[in-house]
Amino acid sequence: MSSPASQSPSNGANDGWSPSSWRSKPVAQPVIYPDESKLKGVLDKIQKLPPLVSPGEIERLRHQLIQVQNNQAFLLHAGDCAESFEACTQENISNKIGLILSFSLILIWGARMPIVRIGRIAGQYAKPRSSPTEKIKGEDGTVKEVPSFRGDNVNGLSPNDREPDPQRLLSAYFYSTTTLNYVRSLLASGFASLNNPRDWSLSHVRSPALRNEFETISNGLADAIDFCRTIGAEPSFVGGAAFERGGAHGVLSDVDLYTSHEGLMLDYEEALTRNLPVPASVLAAQASRNQAPVSTSAPYNTSAHFLWVGDRTRQLTGAHIEYFRGIRNPIGVKVGPSMKPDELVQLLDVVNPSREDGKITLITRYGAEKIGAHLAGHIEAVQSSGHPVIWVCDPMHGKYARVLVALGREAPLIKPLSLGSTLTSSSGLKTRHFSTIVSEVTSCLRIHTECGSRLGGISLEFTGELNEEGFSVTECLGGSMELSEEQLGLRYQVLLPFYECAR
């Protein structure tokens, strides 16, 4: 078993860095545990557990992200806003992967470009909050102040289960492992085969227009596959056995899907940071390009292939940037309206001083009403700096509306609610209108074009979870289903508003 990187020396470009050097910096969004000795015991155990992902997989993703950066592929980053332990089921995972595959198929069909798929899955359990506490109205009508819900790896959703429990970090490891194991099994056994796109979690789509549009793509794909079968372009079509009967994977059934989460809980991330050998092929490729070689070993975060630092934790002198600057994984940085252009360049100088290709993905999240005032300035600053980055649009943030309607009752009233505001009663539902999501994406495409830049990907929050009646989550107004305020309570998930998968 590999030893944790905290027991190994720093590598060259990161003098003074170690997986624990973040502890000397101020921590944003801290979690205060009542028993530090219990926390230490859990972290010691996690340090001894096997990695979830390997250096080879991480380096493969880095290579594919270089293709995205060079306009040879497009990035789809998608999945739950926040996973829950309870939702770790065969059906939910299958539906979620099917939804990601469906989106990527549509993108491939429309853009005629390879898609790099990164799921917000197998570790996205923590939630940043704008306040450490929130006020909850109980069934008896009394209001009490409790610690904010921070995600299943910190505390419970119930107001009576809000004390942070380090044992939940260990649970998060095993739920992540279980999820990742099932995802690997699905992808290895033909679930992603382009011969079966109709099996990918679309049975719940009620919009005839959407179903017909996807059927058109599926039928066109089937025709293309039939043509390949006829001319023998795909070896598995000619005398080859199916995978289940001993055949090899083919290009139509083998896809890469990488895992990601927000690197919010630094104790957990440190425990899963390991000093591991850099694959020989990576060292050889760098030598052939006369690049300065990396060390033969490097600190890999083995909890996920890709991690991102949030808009609330990206302080230049803070603990999260200190941690992120040292890991070998490709990383994302959320960029919002509060980020100044010169601050963005300074941050890039810290997290990617060597200006490595494929290392940094900038995930912009302004809101439709603010993107015009901020994106162009950020693009121009990065272009002037010469830093290589991938630009990704996250249209799932900005302004919510709070719908004051009790579940099952008609009492609609929509008022503006700024991002990060917390619910103050059991009848306050946060939502967004689908048209604002589309507006931000189209504005992002236009601004990149005007600036001589390129949008390299999109980051979406969605889920494939269904209820017993077959409804997916109902948390966005409008869209093809024309969801109304009164219908939000049909399938409202309280963790955070999602992108409903029939959109």
Image (cartoon, rainbow, N blue to C red):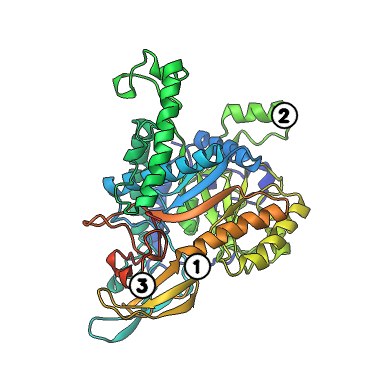
Kindly tell me whether residue 251 is visible in this rendering.
yes
**Residue holding disc 3:** 485
Q: Nearer the viewer, residue 373 or 419?
A: 373
- Mark 3 vs 2, N-terminal side: 2
Which SS class for mark 3? helix
Kindly tell me whether residue 50 is visible in this rendering.
no
Q: Are marks 1 and 2 in contact (CB under 8 Å)?
A: no
- Mark 3 vs 1, N-terminal side: 1
Q: Quick one: label 3, few (<14), some, or many (20+) residues within 10 Å?
A: many
**Residue holding disc 1:** 29
- The disc placed on residue 206 is none
For the point 33% across and 51% down, the residue is: 205
**Residue holding disc 2:** 289
Q: CA distance from mark 3 to mark 1?
A: 32 Å
**Image coords of residue 287 (percent x, y):** 70, 28
Q: Quadrant of residue 432?
A: bottom left
- State which quarter of the image contains the N terminus: top left
Quick one: which residue is furthest to the right in this view? 384
Q: Is residue 234 above or below residue 129?
A: above
Q: CA distance from mark 3 to mark 2?
A: 57 Å
Q: Is residue 221 left or right of 277 when viewed as pictured?
A: left
Q: Quick one: label 2, few (<14), some, or many (20+) residues within 10 Å?
A: few
Q: Is residue 53 above or below residue 228?
A: below
Q: Is residue 133 above or below residue 333?
A: below
